[in-house]
Image (cartoon, rainbow, N blue to C red):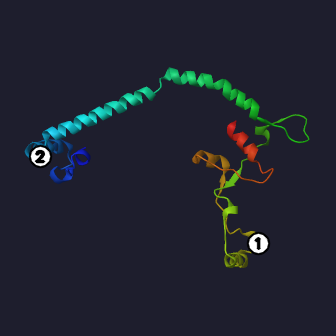
Amino acid sequence: MVREKLDKNLNEFVDVSNLDTAVFDLIITVESEGWVDELVRVAHDRILLLDELFKSLSKVAKSKEDIAKEEAALRPYLAWVETQYDTMQIFGMARPVSLSAIYTDVFVLDRPTALCRFSLEALQESYREAGRERALCHGERQSGLSLVQRESRLFILGKPGAGKTTFLKRLVV
């Protein structure tokens, strides 16, 4: 507060390693320098700011009863989502199959390989070193579910039948 509002460096006139002596030294310095009124005004403004922040947070904070009501209201919707997306109709089968019965973990790359660009020399060098088996631009292979937990946004690309829709259904259920 002293540094921000009064443009004073507290370390210059107070030993901040010991809080008891720091407060005492600050009071002595404030009185001798003649900026008691300014310090009191700044402290008052800071207290008002903290009070407003506390009032705002208390408006946002929810009681346990409110949270319980929201969870109770959410349960029917989650049950509906599960009934909608927990099965898949597989071509050639008469009945839909449970998603949990057919789902296998998806492994994804952390960046699309199609966006990589190389010079002719780099491609030729890669071919000489490793042959066709090694891709020049390959991202790190990761579990799709762990990537979803870490990242806030994903862009899912894949060939037809690669499992994009099944993966998204699995996330929902």
Q: For this view, does 103 lie left or right of residue 119?
A: right
Crowd rating for badge 2 (residues with CA inside 10 Å; few <14, some 14–19, many 20+)? some
> Vertical placement of 106 versus 56: above or below?
below
Give the residue at x 32% y 34%.
Answer: 50
Count of marks overlaid on the render: 2
List x then y, in percent, for residue 134.
72, 69
* Label 1 sits on residue: 132
* Label 2 sits on residue: 29
List x then y, in percent, for residue 137.
67, 66
List x then y, in percent, for residue 17.
22, 49
The quadrant holding residue 46 is: top left
Mark 1 residue type = Arg
Q: For this view, does 63 lie left or right of residue 144?
A: left
Q: For this view, does 133 lie left or right of residue 146?
A: right
Nearest to the observer: residue 80 or residue 64: 80
Mark 2 residue type = Thr
Quick one: SS at disc 2?
A: helix
Nearest to the observer: residue 98 or residue 116: 116
The quadrant holding residue 36 is: top left
> Vertical placement of 160 versus 120: above or below?
above
Quick one: SS at disc 1?
A: helix
* Mark-to-mark CA distance, 2 and 1: 75 Å
